[in-house]
Structure formats: structure tokens, C-alpha cells
Amino acid sequence: MSTKIGFRLLAAVLLLAAACDKAPEVIPVASVSVRPDALSLTEGETGKLTATVSPENATDKTVTWSTSDATVATVSGGTVTAVKAGLAVITAESGGKKATCTVTVSPKVYSVTGVTLDINKLEDLLDGEERTLKATVLPENATDKRVTWASSDDKVSTVDQNGKVTAVYTGTATITVTTADGGKQASCTVTVKGRPREVRLDKPTLDITEGETAALSATVLPENAYDKTVTWGTSDAAVATVAPDGTVTAVAAGTATITATAGTASAQCAVTVHHKRIVIYIFNKSGYTPLYLYAWTQDATLDWPGITPDGTEEIQGVTYLTFTLPETLYGDVSFFIHDMADLHTPDYKPETAAGPPYYCLLRSTGLVAIDPATFDPTTSGGTEGYGNGNEYGEGSF
């Protein structure tokens, strides 16, 4: 009995020893799968991939991970980290079997938090002047830095999409910059002071006599022009001068142009200067009428019409006839008085034989007032004529 038990124990030991000498069975990997097989991330984000190795009882289920572009995405233990925008393929491998996941990395969006301008106020711009504003979008790494520009009043100032501001006309406008992302805004107040655009004179023409003065007044437009200073000038100072306040002084007979200038705008006044009136006072002692004053210049070749009295003036109880010479006769003039309507030739020289007094003359140059209290024709340039009724004289006026 004991011999049988021992035999059986020996057989069991031998069988066990045989089993221990046999190599273990290796079960290979049949396939690998990755979930998800596509992944979208934003820069800086992470995502988790899961690899499944089949069969479940595969001897070695170790998985190794790799990336096609570590600058776009990295992987460790199935965890994918997005580095920068782009495309990368993540591969899971086990037992020679592979599976992949396509990873798309999008740029990280940095939202705009604000915008500023380098200049917040533009003052005293003259129309036509330009300035360029610079906008800074915040933060510095904002994804979308696009901006648009606008003016509150294009009639005052305009702005292009590069921030260049152009002053147009007098007034105030607001230039605003707006971000495309978030609609953030900043503004600059623009004040335009226009240049003088027009000068108006109160008199377009002026007729004055030698020695007289006349005032010109200039109006500069627009009313709020930046600099309304007016400068005055004359085309011929020998004829007429003009003072800084617009006072014109007639110097000598002729024509001149007075110009008022403000900025680039100007206006003109045509000035005609006339000779002083030359008035000859005649006391008609004879009483003959009509009475004529004949006058001619030394180089005259034509008959000259007689000048009739144009008024009277009473001096010391005596009434004098006044004759005003036309400007065409100014200069070296010959004249005679006649009480008949006919006119002799210019070289006619009347006789001056002694006889009863006939006329009394006073030659007065210019608008010279006569003082009746001191007037004496015998000492004030007066002469008397005798003989046949004609008085002849010469003079420069």
C-alpha cells in the first residue's frame, strides 16, 4: 500500500517538473486604435487621446506616442499640448501596430481690451493743413488689430483710413478710431481756424482831389478766420498813398490801385485823383452879360469853348462870379474874359489900352476858402482890365 502511494507521488513530481520546463505562450498585438481620431485645439490648450490595444490579452500592450511636428503639437502619455497654429499627426504604436490622430491647432485669440491715440486734441489747424494720428490697440498681442477711422463733420476735417487728418474749413470736428474687435473707441478733437478766404472793401472805386484823404474799410471773411490782419498797398505812391489803417491820401492827379490783403485773399479799390479845382473869381464891373472865360493850354491848336459862371460868392458885400477850369486845362494856361459869345483864335491877344475899369479877377488855386474880412483883390492876385472890355492873363495852375 505504501509502495503505491510513493509511486504516485513520484509520478506527480515528474509531471510537475515537465510542466515547468515548457515556455509560456506569447499573444501578439493584433491592432491599435486611437480615440478621438481627430482633435481641434487652440494654442496652449491640451487634449487627451486614448489608445486601445487588441486583443485584450495581448502579451505586451505597451503604447508609445509620437508627433509629426513638435512645433505644432506635442504628446506625452496620450496628452496632446497645442503649441502653435498648424497641423500635426499624433501616432500611437504598440506591438508594431499603429493608429493616428490628426490634430489641428488654431491661433489663440487675444481679445482687444482698448485703443488709444497719440494725440487727443488738435488745435489751431489752418484749412489745408494735415496731421496723422497714431492708434495703439491693446493689448499689444491682440489678435485682431484692425481699426476704422471716421470724422464727425467732413466739412470741417476729414480723415482717411491711415489716420491722416486734413483740415477743411473753420469749425470743430471729432475724429474717432474704432476697433474691429470689440468696438473699442478713442477720439481726437480737431479745431480748424480757416485762413482768410475773402476780403471786401466798402468802396470799389474812389474819386478824390489832390491833398484830400478818404478812408477805406476792409472786411475779412470768414468772420472767425485765423488771422484777419490786413495789409495795405498802392500801385503808385506818386498818385495815392495808403496808411496801415486804410486811409488813402491823394498826392497828384492820376490813377492808382489800392490793395487790401489778408493771407492769400485780397481786394482792390480803383482810385482816381483829380487836380484841385482851380476857381477864378471875377467881379463884373461892366455889367455885360453873358460873360465868358476863355482858356487854353499853350500848345492848343483848336478853338476852345467859353466857360460860363458856375456860381457866385459874395465877399465884402461884392458879388463875384466863379469860373471853374476843367482839368484838361490844368498846367500852363492862357485865358481871357469876353462878354460876347464868339471866340477868337487862341493866339488872339486883346488890346489893353487905358480906359475905364472893366473886370476884377482873383485867381484862386484849389478849394481855398476866401476870408471876407481880409480879402483885397488888389493884393490877393487880382487884376483889372481896361480898354475894349477884355482881360487877358496867363498862369500855371
Image (tube, grey):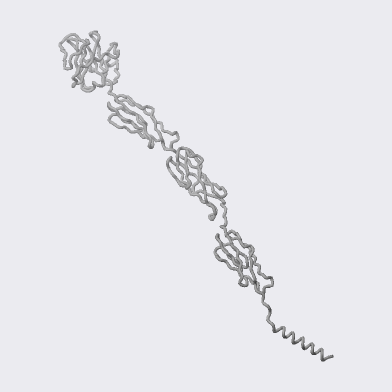
The quarter holding residue 371 reads top left
Horizontal and vertical percent position of residue 357: 20, 10
Residue 378 seen in the current view: no
Residue nearer the viewer, 313 or 222 = 222
Q: Quadrant of the N terminus?
A: bottom right
Q: Is residue 391 above or below residue 28?
A: above
| Pick the front one: 396 or 160 | 160
Position of residue 324 measured from the top left corner of the image (x, y, whole percent): 27, 17
Q: Is residue 128 visible?
A: yes
Quadrant of the rendering where the C terminus is positioned: top left
Left or right of residue 281, residue 138 in this image: right
Point out residue 33 in the picture as x, y percentages from the top left corner: 64, 66
Q: Residue at x 57, y 60 (%)?
A: 105
> Who is closer to the viewer here, 343 or 68?
68
Q: Is residue 223 shown above or below 70? A: above
Looking at this rendering, what residue extends furthest in the right direction? 1
Left or right: residue 64 versus residue 189 is right
Q: Is 100 situated left or right of 362 in this image? A: right
Q: Is residue 374 left or right of residue 345?
A: right
Image spot of residue 358 (x, y percent): 21, 10
Q: Which residue is nearer to you in this view: 228 or 173?
A: 173
Q: Quadrant of residue 322?
A: top left
